[in-house]
């Protein structure tokens, strides 16, 4: 059943813009963000509901949230690189603004490997019209 669903959703994939920040670091007590790299992925974007709501942290269950299904691994904010560096979350550009990746669920069973990436509105961030 999962294979059938993925095959059906693959026909709905479209290009989606992503901004990937390089790792930032603390310098003299100040946080310095890394530079951003724009990239385009192929993904299906769906509203979040049902069982997917249970995957989200409780504080995000009422936020404007989407599930991005893609073969490209995206990074959520909790990913740590080193103690002196922290990776900021990737940001996904949708029609109504920027969304930050808050949770990534890998599906790497060897057949139709993909990632379910949950994105929520990045408050204060809007794309230029």
Image (spheres, rainbow, N blue to C red):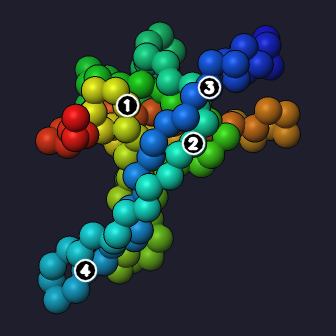
Residue at the far bottom in the pictured view: 28
Q: Earlier in the sequence, mark 4 or mark 2?
A: 4
State the SS at label 4: strand
To which residue does mark 3 refer? 13
Residue at (47%, 10%) from the top-left corner? 50
Snapshot quadrant of residue 36: bottom left
Task: Return the residue at label 2.
Answer: 41
Q: Which residue is mark 4?
A: 26
Real-space Cα separation, disc 1 to disc 4, in angstroms:
31 Å
**Side of 102 where 122 appears, left or right:** left
- For image coordinates 23% across by 75% down, the residue present is 32
- Which label lies toward us, 3 or 4? 3
Q: Position of residue 98 (x, y in %)?
A: 30, 38
On the image, numbered disc 1 is attached to which residue? 94
* Viewer-nearest of discs 1 and 4: 1
Q: Earlier in the sequence, mark 3 or mark 1?
A: 3
Q: Secondary structure at mark 3?
A: loop
User: At x 43% / y 16%, what residue is drawn?
Assistant: 47
In the image: residue 50, left or right of residue 5: left
Is 68 placed above or below 103 here? above
3 and 1 marks in contact (CB < 8 Å): no
């Amino acid at each position: 059943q999962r294979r059938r669903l993925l095959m059906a959703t693959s026909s709905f994939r479209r290009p989606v813009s992503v901004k990937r920040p390089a790792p930032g670091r603390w310098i003299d007590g100040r946080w310095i963000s890394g530079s951003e790299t724009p990239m385009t992925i192929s993904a299906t974007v769906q509203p979040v509901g049902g069982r997917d709501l249970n995957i989200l942290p409780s504080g995000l269950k009422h936020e404007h949230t989407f599930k991005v299904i893609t073969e490209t691994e995206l990074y959520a904010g909790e990913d740590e690189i080193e103690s002196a560096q922290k990776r900021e979350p990737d940001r996904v550009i949708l029609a109504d603004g920027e969304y930050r990746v808050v949770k990534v669920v890998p599906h790497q069973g060897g057949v139709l490997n993909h990632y379910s990436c949950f994105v929520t509105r990045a408050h204060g961030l809007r794309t230029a019209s």
